[in-house]
Amino acid sequence: LRMPNSETKISVILTSYNHAQFIRESIESVLNQTFLDFEMIIWDDASTDDSWEIIQSYRDPRIIAYRNEENMGGRSISRAIRKGVYGEYIAILHSDDAWEPSKLEKQVVYLDHNPEIAAVFTHVQVIDEEGQPFTDKNHFYYDVFDQPNRDRFEWLRHFFYNGNALCHPSLMIRKTCYEDINFRNGMNQLPDFNLWIQL
């Protein structure tokens, strides 16, 4: 049973669905962060493979795990936030992604020193199922996240004319931002895009 800690700096929300072959690497990439003051909420979306058994094998006190009784399709992040997270900042990870060890540390330093900034993203290394760098230069995901920084109006213009180019699992965001977010469950295929536009 997790003991609430209102002083936790980061709430990591890890969404899980049928990624048994990857989820251990995802969890370990969080546990191996150089920044240690976090809680990790793992929300499994009724996986039918061994994902839930792997999740339950961890005994780290910073982890709390939930499991949907039936597949909800993309609502796990909003459910986790509504359930209650303690961190000043929220970081999102999916069960087929992994972080570099200093990811959280660098983002915390930036947000701590820039209180006017709501969220920060990172560059992304796209990898294949073997964990090797993606080499298909014709694939949409090869360089879609390789973007320059923009001000808010330039980002909105890019979103509406080009589409989404921000990677959700690279995000760290202030928890207070979610107080102003209207989660639209009817937009299950576009939750990231919807979130960036509202921000």
Image (cartoon, grey):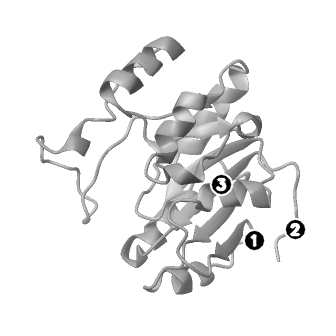
Please name the residue that numbered disc 2 is placed on: 3
Q: Nearer the viewer, mark 3 or mark 1?
A: 3
Instruction: Pick the residue in front: 193 or 111.
Output: 193
Tag 1 or tag 2, which sits nearer the N-term? 2
Q: Which SS class for mark 3?
A: helix
Residue 21 location (% of width, % of height): 37, 76
Q: Residue placed at 42% from the left, 76% from the top?
A: 18
Q: Residue placed at 68% from the left, 79% from the top?
A: 59
Residue 135 location (% of width, % of height): 14, 48
Please name the residue that numbered disc 3 is placed on: 78
Kind of residue sitting beneath label 2: Met
Quadrant housing the N terminus: bottom right
Residue 48, picture quadrant: bottom left
**198 left or right of 187 in image:** right
Kind of residue sitting beneath label 3: Ser
Residue 174 location (% of width, % of height): 70, 36
Instruction: Pick the residue in front: 112 or 147.
Output: 147
Residue furthest to the front: 186
Q: Residue placed at 76% from the left, 45% from the top?
A: 9
Task: Find the distance from the CA under tag 2 to the CA under tag 1.
Answer: 9 Å
